[in-house]
Image (cartoon, rainbow, N blue to C red):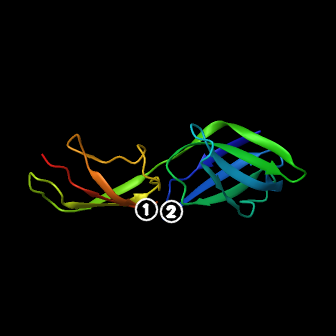
Amino acid sequence: SVAERSSPITANTFILDLQGTNIAAATDVTLVGVTDSSRRFTGVIGTVNDAAIDDVEVTFTNVVAGQYNVEVIVSGNNFASSTQTVEVPATATISGAEFSSLAGGALITIDGTGFFTEKDENNRVDICGLKCEIDSQTFSQILCRAPAF
């Protein structure tokens, strides 16, 4: 069995503390999207946190916000999957134009972590209920144009 404790994203890093029988023998840990299994992120397995053989820390970087199942491969090709999901949050800080004309168009910068990198409905920015047209997006930044009011 696998239990997990997770930390919030800090500087594009998400740390998962796995506990379970023989978990220190884990050779591969992957986060698999609950609603989209094509979203997969493989972690870097760190050293055992303490002397116990049932505790290991796994670090993931640039994980898109969402819910994930945890897949663990233990040496000898034994597979374990936790029954709980891990929630990876997005963070955001907005800067740019403090005001825009009624015609819109002011560039708004949203810095943070956990943003989708593809242009799709999952990355949507609304300002006062109106869609802010996205110019560009990365894991850590979205640039959009303020809508006309």
Element type at mark 1:
loop
* Depth order, front residue of 49/69: 69
Which dot marks residue 39?
none
* Depth order, front residue of 92/52: 92
- Image quadrant where one finds the N terminus: top right
Residue 128 percent coordinates (x, y): 20, 43
Who comes first in sequence, dot 2 or dot 1? Answer: 2
Which dot marks residue 140?
1
- Image quadrant where one finds the C terminus: top left
Which dot marks residue 12?
2
Residue ID at (58%, 40%): 36
Q: Is residue 27 left or right of residue 106?
A: right
Residue ID at (70%, 39%): 82
Q: Amino acid at mark 2?
A: Asn
Residue 136 percent coordinates (x, y): 36, 61
Q: Toward which corner of the image does residue 52 lie, by quadrant?
A: bottom right
93, above or below 122, in the image: below
